[in-house]
Amino acid sequence: MKFKHILLASLILIIGIGPLLAQTTQNPYNIPPGTEKITLASIFRDSNAHGIFGYLILLTFTIGIVYAFIRYIQLYQKEKVNAPNLYKSLKGYIKNNQIEEAIKITEKLKDTTLGYIFWNGITAYKEIPKDASKEEVSTNVQNAFDEAALQKVYKLDAGLFWFDILAQVCTYLGLLGTIWGLLYAFAAISNPTVLDTQKNLMLSAGIKTAIGTTALGLIAAIPLTLIKGALQSRAQKIINDIDEFSVKFINFITSLAKG
């Protein structure tokens, strides 16, 4: 599943969770008419009834979504290179001894990880003497590819761990809000100056805060986890393409060596 599908599904989950959680018109639990339906808005309101945990969860989730768009642009837009087509094109130019043309193509793609690595490798190949042995060609080009990879590849999945941290923070804030709501409920019960009717209302309010905060934390954590998985998958695909076509290209160049 592509990242945009994961992101779209996550947004639909967040926006549409209210209607999905709302009680149906069939009223299977015989809830009295006029009882408030469960929606995302009501969950958010309950989570903030006796604290600001809902706002903190929303803030954390918003940070995760903004960072997701940034990483989406980096991994899906800036790294948009058709690796098989690039390899075939460069292979044809190198085979016809059109090294300068190959360098020009890769130079245009230097902003991408794959393009930079190939540009660095082909530039190193150009400087190798014509009478160099196969071993010398293979070693020099391999070193050039490895050097470029060390400079760029680690950036592909760098920072994705933040999605795990943000998801955990949302979950922990939900749990903390749960404890806070229960403390409010127990405080109402143990207060001898509060009437029984008021105790029941305060007890219900505390439990609603506790459950609502837990639910909101999970609602925020699940999409962040899915987004992280999609971005991680994309980064790994780029890394796999780099490994595969770098090896193929080095083997191809080595086979052309005369020594």
Image (cartoon, rainbow, N blue to C red):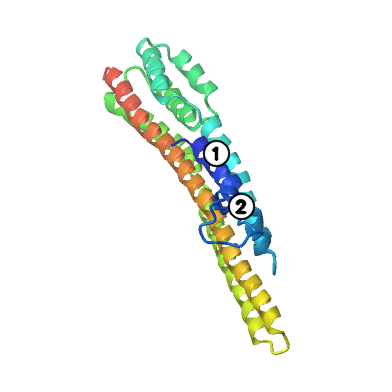
The quarter holding residue 150 reads top left
* Rendered image: mark on residue 179: none
Q: Which residue is mark 1?
A: 8
Q: Is residue 37 positioned above or below 126 on the image?
A: below
In the image, taking residue 110 as reference, residue 42 lies left or right, namely: right
Circle 1: residue type: Leu
Residue shown at 36% from the left, 28% from the top:
245
Q: Residues within 10 Å of mark 2 (few under 14, many from 20)?
A: many
Q: Percent from the top left, x then y, of residue 117?
A: 45, 30
In this orientation, does residue 226 appear? yes
Q: Which residue is mark 2?
A: 61
Q: Percent from the top left, x then y, of residue 224?
A: 53, 50
The quarter holding residue 78 reads top right
| Residue reaching furthest to the bottom | 192
**Quarter holding the C terminus?**
top left
Q: Nearer the viewer, residue 26 or 244?
A: 26
Q: Is residue 104 positioned above or below 149 on the image?
A: above
Kindly report which numbered mark, 2 or 1, lies closer to the viewer in this rendering. 1
In the image, taking residue 76 as reference, residue 136 lies left or right, namely: left
Residue shown at 46% from the left, 46% from the top:
229
Residue shown at 41% from the left, 25% from the top:
83
Circle 2: residue type: Phe
Q: Percent from the top left, x then y, of residue 1?
A: 43, 37
Q: Nearer the viewer, residue 87 or 149?
A: 87
**Mark 2 and mark 1: Cα distance apart in space:** 15 Å
Q: Is residue 45 positioned above or below 203 on the image?
A: above
